[in-house]
Image: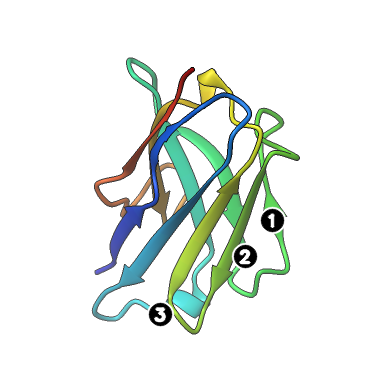
Amino acid sequence: EVELVESGGGLVQPGGSLRLSCAASGRGFTFSNQWMYWVRQAPGQVLEWIATISDDSDQTYYPDIVKRRFTVSRDNAKSTLYLQMNDLKTEDTAVYYCAINSRGGGRGQGTQVTVSS
């Protein structure tokens, strides 16, 4: 069973940056073999996929709404997933989760990102 713990959220002004982290662990879970995902949920909205990274980091995918602003990466030696977010907008305000699929499977408690002036 996987355990995912997100961190790094906070309050940032529009145009600012944040870097989120996700520490992965779990009995029988091998992080280095797992494609990983970031999803987010804004107040009153459904869960939204925002990034995918392959197990070896060779492939990354983003929806248009975050492409060229967000960058997903990972360190398999540390079993840690990252999300670098630049040029943040107010509409990026949400709880951010890492997950083992694009539907948010296995996600942790999330980390709040608030973009406001």
Label located before the other in sequence (1 or 2): 2
**Front-lying residue, 66 or 17:** 17
The residue labelled by disc 1 is: 60
Q: How many marks can you see?
A: 3
Marks 1 and 3, the one that precedes in the sequence: 3
The answer to whether residue 4 is visible is yes
Q: Give the crowd class for mark 1: few <14, some 14-19, many >=20 residues within 10 Å.
A: some
Kindly state the secondary structure of the residue where label 2 is placed: loop
Image quarter for residue 29?
A: bottom left
Q: Amino acid at mark 3?
A: Thr
- Distance, label 1 to label 3, CA atoms, is 19 Å
Q: Label 2 vs label 3: CA separation?
A: 13 Å
Identify the amino acid type marked 1. Thr
Q: Which mark is residue 30?
A: 3
Task: Identify the residue shown where x is 29% and y is 81%.
Answer: 28
**Could you tell me residue 4's position as x and y percent?**
31, 61
**Residue receiving disc 2:** 54
Where is the N terminus found, in terms of image quarters?
A: bottom left
Dot 3: element:
loop
Near mark 3 (Cα within 10 A), the count class, few <14, some 14-19 or many ≥20, is few
Q: Earlier in the sequence, mark 2 or mark 3?
A: 3
> Dot 1: what SS?
strand
Residue contact at pointers 1 and 2, CB within 8 angstroms = yes
Q: Position of residue 88 (x, y in %)?
A: 59, 30
Say which residue appears at 49% left-offset and 17% top-offset.
Answer: 117
Residue type, label 2 = Ser
Residue 94 position (above or below residue 25): above
